[in-house]
Amino acid sequence: MKNFFKQLGKAFCYLGAYMGCQGIAGLIMLVGCGVVIGYKSAASGETNLATSYVMEQAGIMVENNMGVALIINAILAMAIYLVVMKIRKHKFTKEVAIKKVGVKTIILAIAAALGAICVIDYGVELLPIPEELMNGLVEDTGKVAGMPLWQSILAASIIVPIMEEIVFRGFMFSRLDKAMPTWIAVAITSIAFGLVHGQMIWALLAALTGAVFNIVRIKTGSIIPTIVMHMVNNSLATLIPESASEIPIPTIAVVIFGAVLLAISLYFIGRDEDKGEVAEVEVKVSEDIKKVA
C-alpha cells in the first residue's frame, strides 16, 4: 500500500509540473503581450490607456497565439523533467519508455490512429448528446484550429503530442503500472488525459483516445508509436479544413470501418517487437549453453 501511494504521488507530481508550467506560460504570454501593446501605444502617442483595456487586448493576443504559449509550456516542463532526472540519476528515455520500434509498428500505429478517429470522433455523432455541449466542442476545437499555420504545425502537431505522451504514457503510466493492476493504471491515466482537455465532450473523446494510446503503449513497450498516433490525431484536427471531414458516407459506415481497422491494428501491433526480444534472449541463452558445454 505504501508503494501504491508513493507511485501515485510521483505520477501526479509529474502531471502537476506540466499543468503548472501551462499556467506560468500563460502568465508569461499575458505579460509579454501587455508590454507589446503598451509599447505600440506609446509609439503611436497613446499614453493614457486604461489597464483594463490593455489586459483585454493582451488576452485576445494570447488567445490568437496559443501555439506560442504551448511552446513555452513545453520548454519549461522539459527543463524541469530533465533537472529532476539528473538529480535522481535516472535515464530519461528509460523513465518515459522511449524505445526504438520497427517501421511495421509505426505503420500500424498510424492505422490505429485513423481507426480510433473514425470510431471515437465520428461515433460521438451517433450519441444523443445535447446540442449545447456539441456547440461547446466545436467552439473549443475551433480556437485550436484557428491558430496561425506555423503554430498549428510546430505546437499542436509536433510539440504537444511529444510532451503529452511523455507526461501521460511516459511518466504517469510507467509509475502507476508499478503499483496497481494495469487496467487501473490505464483508467487513471486516460481519465486524467481527458480532464486536462477541458470541455466535457472533448474530455470524453480525449479519455477514450488516451485509452487506445495506452493499449499501444502496453503492447509495444514504447511511447514512440503513441507519439506518432497523437501527431496524426492532432494534425487531422488542426490542419485539415472542417469541410474536408464532411465525407458523403453514412456515419455508421465510417464507425464500422474504423472499428475494423482499429481492431486489426491493435491485434498485430507490437508483435514483431515482442518476438524480436524473445529471439534475442533465446539466442543469448543458446550461446551460453554452448559455452558451458
Image (cartoon, grey):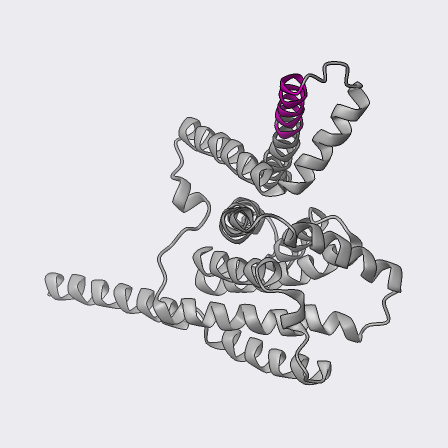
Find residue 103 and report its horizontal and vertical position in percent.
Answer: 35, 68
Q: Is residue 110 magenta?
A: no
Quadrant occupied by the N terminus:
top right
Residue name at image x 62 percent, y 57 percent: 186
Residue name at image x 23 percent, y 64 percent: 285
Quadrant occupied by the C terminus:
bottom left
Q: Which residues are magenta?
A: 29-44
Position of residue 226 in the picture relative to residue 255 (left or right): left
Residue name at image x 22 percent, y 67 percent: 283
Residue 274 in which image quadrant: bottom left
Image height of 20 relative to 177, above or below:
above
Find residue 251 and report its horizontal and vertical position in percent.
Answer: 72, 80
Number of labelled discs?
A: 0
Image height of 145 relative to 130, above or below:
above
Position of residue 281 in the picture relative to residue 117 (left or right): left
Chief SS of the magenta region: helix
Front-most of residues 159 and 111: 159
Find residue 93 and report its horizontal and vertical position in percent.
Answer: 39, 45
Front-most of residues 10 and 291: 10
Find residue 22 and report its horizontal and vertical position in percent.
Answer: 63, 35
Q: Is residue 40 magenta?
A: yes
